[in-house]
Image: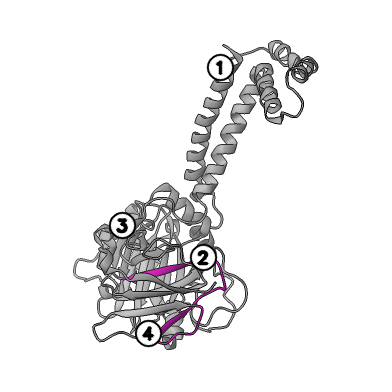
Amino acid sequence: MSPRGRFLVATLSGLVLAGLVHVVVVLSIPRLSETDALSRARSSEALDHPMPVNTVAAGDAPATAEAWLPIPDPSVAVGLCAYDLADGPMRVSARTGPLMMSLAVHGRRGAFYAVTDQAAVRGALDLVVLTRAQYDEALANADEDEVSHDVRIVAPDSKGYVVVRVIAALPSQRPAADAAVQAVSCTVDSPAEDAKPGG
Amino acid sequence: MRMTLAETVARLRPVQTRPASSEARRSGAAPPGRAGQRVAGAFRGAIRRASTVTLVLYALALGAGIGLLTADYATRGGYPFGGVRVGAWTAWPKVGSLGADPYARAVNARRGEIPLTIGEGMLLTADQDDAGRALDAACTYAVAGVTPPARAWTVTVAGRGAREPGPAPMREGFTATEILRETDGRFVITLSPEVQSGNWLPMPRARGPVRLALRLYDTPVAASAGNLDRSAVPAITRGACAA
């Protein structure tokens, strides 16, 4: 093969290699990233209320250390609850108020469920995020006579986070929006609590 | 291509021994002062002298370099694909869902973004006006019309890139409740560096490009962003510009 031909073959194989490297890098960024929302939310796993990500009250106070959202909406309070379903199903309980609230459940690959306060039953919104096995178990243990208002969501993978957004339509509602995010409870449903009647 | 060590060394050795002769040949062939020809000559000489190992290393370096650079370029800043143009605005309906493309997921992971999902709402961004000119902080713009149906919406303005340090501007956006409307329900937001009457949205910075974001919360149009008409979103028209 002529030197020029060898050089062309090397260039072409370099370009093919570049395509492969490009695809592999793009696909592995979400897995390797340490600055994505899932990795940052890990630190909130021990909390039983959402970690504030974007607070809207206190106009000129410095932003919280957790504030990492690139361009947050200045009138929407955002909180995060990380979950790890290996510890048990995750229960998110919210009381609806005058402010509009939405809950979204994100897994590793993206959001798979979202609900707003319009779906609340008598002012309460209860989401239970569980794995397929935990869902089957909950169905088997369910009491037929008891009406449950829980919304059961089967998660595609065991780790993820729940995003709570509360919209303050007026600046005077901003403290209430921050408080509404903090008032949501995110707890792990342990089997012992499940066994209690009416729990 | 498999080679023994001896063969490799034998192929490598000419690389070290030949330069002197080719240098002499090149300086004889190329007249002085013709730099382009000399570079081309050196390039041809390098190709002729390159051993297999050199070529393999060249291919690996080319692959790694171009692959990493293009991956970085494609996942830096905004989402490269999946935008739906509606007038001057671009909607990103799928970036938060399980069906998001790998580039959108990589962009979200790098920025730490938590995108709005279809059930929550929809984000529309605009970095140019209706005539296609980039939004500039020195100009005055009228953002006028109606929004698609939604329980709540906000219009915010930000400079591109990271937020500048210092105190936050006194107003970064309007919500649907705050806005002053005409009697027919339409509204006009004036985005301007100068104080304006009505719904004045101050420019977030003194100069440079800016970007508008329209966030619709709890909206039925999120699932069908492609069907939005440009009369359903606010029009952005440019007014006077400071020199």
Sequence-wise, the earlier of marks 4 and 2 is 4
Chain letter for the residue marked with disc 2 in the picture:
B
A86 vs B119: above or below: above
Is label 3 on the same chain as label 1?
Answer: yes
Residue beneath the point at 75% across and 23% down? B31
Mark 3 against mark 1, which lies toward the viewer? 1
Magenta stretch contains residue B200: yes
Chain on which label 4 sits: B
Disc 2 packing (10 Å; few <14; some 14–19; many ≥20): some
For the residues carrying marks 4 and 1, which lies nearer the camera in this image? 1
Which of the two marks, 3 or 4, is nearer to us in this view?
4
Chain-order first, disc 3 or disc 1: 1
Disc 2: which residue:
B209
Residue closer to the observer: A191 or A134: A134
Mark 1 belongs to chain = A
Res. A135 mark: 3
Please name the amino acid that badge 4 sits on: Glu
- Magenta extent: B193-217
